[in-house]
Amino acid sequence: MIRLSLALLLFVVNIHAFASPWVTGTARSATDNSVLYREFHYLAPTQEPLSGRVEYMTDDDRLIAHKDMDYSRSLTAPAVEQLDIRTQTRFFTRYAETTLQAGFQRGGSALETRTYTPADDLVIDAGFDPYVRSHWTRLLSGRSVTALFHVPSRLESLRISIVPVERQECAQASGEILCLLIRPAGLLRVVGWFLEPLYLAYDLETRRLQMFKGTSNLADDDGRPQSVVILYEYAENLPGQASR
C-alpha cells in the first residue's frame, strides 16, 4: 500500500509539473519576421525551473516536433529525446553506467550511434541554460567561458566559447540584459560548424533566457536550416516553484 501510494504521488507530481507551459517562445524568421513556430516548455520535476518537455507548434496549432529531457544524471548534460514529426528526424542522448550513448537518424536513413565517456564540462541541448547560470559571475564581469557542446547531427562535441558582447548585438531583447555570443573556440572556428553566430540575451535580474538569435535546432518543412529570432515569455506563477 505504501509503495502504491508513493507511485501515485509521483504520478500526480509529474502531471502537475507538466500541466501548463512555464515558458512560451515565439520563433520568427530572421529575414522577414514571419512567425515560423512556437515553443511550449513544460516544467521538469527538478529543484530549479527547467524544461522537461518542449512541444513545437505551427501558428495554426499543428504539432511539428517534441522533445523530452531528463536531468537526473546532469543538469548541464541531460538525457534528451527529440523527434521532428514532419521529417521523422530524431536524436537522443542516453546514459548507461559510466557512458553516454548518442543517436541521430535523419528521416528513413539508418540510425547512427556513438558511445563515449562524457566530459565534466559537456553541455547538451537545454543544459546550456544552467551552464550559463553556473558561470554567471564570470560572464557578468566580461570574461568568457568555454564548454564542450554536443552537436546531435554529427554525434560529436564541439569546443565552444561563450563571450559577453555589446547589448546592441541582442537588440531584439528588451530591458536590462546580458548579451552572449556563442561560437566555436580556438582553431575550430575554421571548421565553421555554426552557419552563423548564435546570440543569447539573459535578463540581468532573473537570469532567465529572453532571446535566442541564430540557426534553429528545427529545420524547415523541407529539412533545411532556418535562421530565427526567438523571444521567450514566462508564466508568472510556476507550479511547485518559488517565484524568482
Image (cartoon, rainbow, N blue to C red):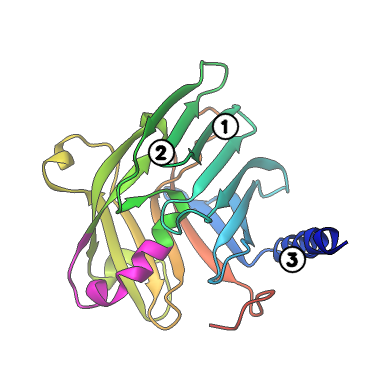
Q: In the visual, does 106 lie left or right of 13?
A: left
Depth check, mark 2 against mark 3: the one in front is 2
Which residue corresponds to the image point at 63% horizontal and 64% vertical from the top-left? Answer: 45
Q: Earlier in the sequence, mark 3 or mark 1?
A: 3
Magenta segment range?
130-145
Depth check, mark 3 against mark 1: the one in front is 3
State the image coordinates of residue 76 (x, y, percent, origin top left): 41, 57
Which residue corresponds to the image point at 53% horizontal and 44% vertical from the top-left? Answer: 80
State the image coordinates of residue 69 (x, y, percent, origin top left): 56, 50
In this view, the residue in front, 170 or 183, is 183
* Residue 236 lies in quadrant: bottom right
Name the residue type under label 1: Asp
Name the residue type under label 3: Val
Count residues near mark 3 (Cα–Cα under 10 Å), then give few for <14, some for 14-19, many for 20+.
Answer: some
Number of on-image labels: 3
In this view, the residue in front, 156 or 31, is 156
Which residue corresponds to the image point at 44% horizontal and 49% vertical from the top-left? Answer: 125
Q: Main secondary structure of the magenta part?
A: helix
Assign a secondary structure to mark 3: helix
In this view, the residue in front, 23 or 35, is 23
Q: Which residue was labeled with disc 2?
A: 99
Count residues near mark 2 (Cα–Cα under 10 Å), then give few for <14, some for 14-19, many for 20+.
Answer: few
Between the residue at mark 3 and the residue at mark 1, the CA separation in whole angstroms equals 36 Å
Between the residue at mark 2 and the residue at mark 3, the CA separation in whole angstroms equals 29 Å
* Residue 164 lies in quadrant: bottom left
Q: Which residue was labeled with disc 3?
A: 13
Q: Earlier in the sequence, mark 2 or mark 1?
A: 2
Q: Which residue was labeled with disc 1?
A: 221
Between the residue at mark 2 and the residue at mark 1, the CA separation in whole angstroms equals 34 Å
Look at the image and say whether residue 131 sits in the magenta stretch: yes
